[in-house]
Image (cartoon, rainbow, N blue to C red):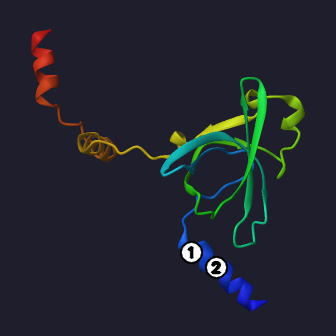
Amino acid sequence: MEKIYQYNRKVRQSRKCPDLKSGDIVKIHRKIKEGDKERIQIFEGIIVSIKGKQSSSPMVTVRRVSFGTGVEITVPLYSPAISKIEVVKRAKVRRSKLYYLREKGFRLSKLKMKELGQFVAEEKEPEAEKQESEEKKGEQPKKTEKELSDKEKK
């Protein structure tokens, strides 16, 4: 049994995969061979289920609605046919398997979404940081040349 655990760790360390949960909207970049040529096709949809989280290659079921018809693919996460997986949005869900979305049609508007841009901290400009620190000290912030010239115009 220990050999299986070691193999699973080895496979997981060899490839990077984002932390996926059911309810995430993801873009899966799949490699497709057509004759001698190879291209990458993007499949964007919501994760309905994740099976085998502890195994060497968990399976992810992704669903999207294309021209009114539901399309699902089940993909092994650590497959060599997958070039990368991007998480676009996260939804707040209370189930691990979202099979109820099959009957509902495409009702993503019912799920509460979290934009990933909210989690990224914006960098402040150095001048803005100086003004904030001076305000905290109780000092008046120094006026820039532009602000001084604006007052003179008035």
Amino acid of disc 1: Gln
- Tell me the quadrant of the picture where the C terminus can be found: top left
Cβ–Cβ under 8 Å for marks 1 and 2: yes
Assign the N terminus to one quadrant of the image.
Answer: bottom right
- Residue found at the very far top of the displayed protein: 154
The image position of residue 11, as x and y in percent, is 61, 75
Q: Which residue is under mark 1?
A: 13
Q: Relative to 85, is 11 above or below? A: below
- With 105 as the anchor, is 59 left or right in this view? left
How far apart are the two marked residues, 1 and 2, measured between alpha carbons? 6 Å
List x then y, in percent, for residue 136: 34, 45
Q: Identify the image quadrant of residue 70.
A: top right
Left-right relation of 96 to 135 = right
Instruction: Please report the residue visible at 84 percent of the width from the left and 36 percent of the height from the top.
Output: 101
Q: What amino acid is found at the position of numbered circle 2 in the picture?
A: Arg
- Residue furthest to the bottom in view is 2
Residue at the spot 67% in from the left edge and 36% down from the top edge:
113
Q: Residue at x 56, y 75 (%)?
A: 13
Helix, strand or loop status at disc 2: helix
Q: Nearer the viewer, residue 102 or 31?
A: 31
- Above or below residue 89? Residue 81 is below
Residue that mark 2 sits on: 9
* Residue depicted at x 17% and y 24%: 147
Question: Does dot 1 land on a helix, a strand or a loop?
Answer: helix
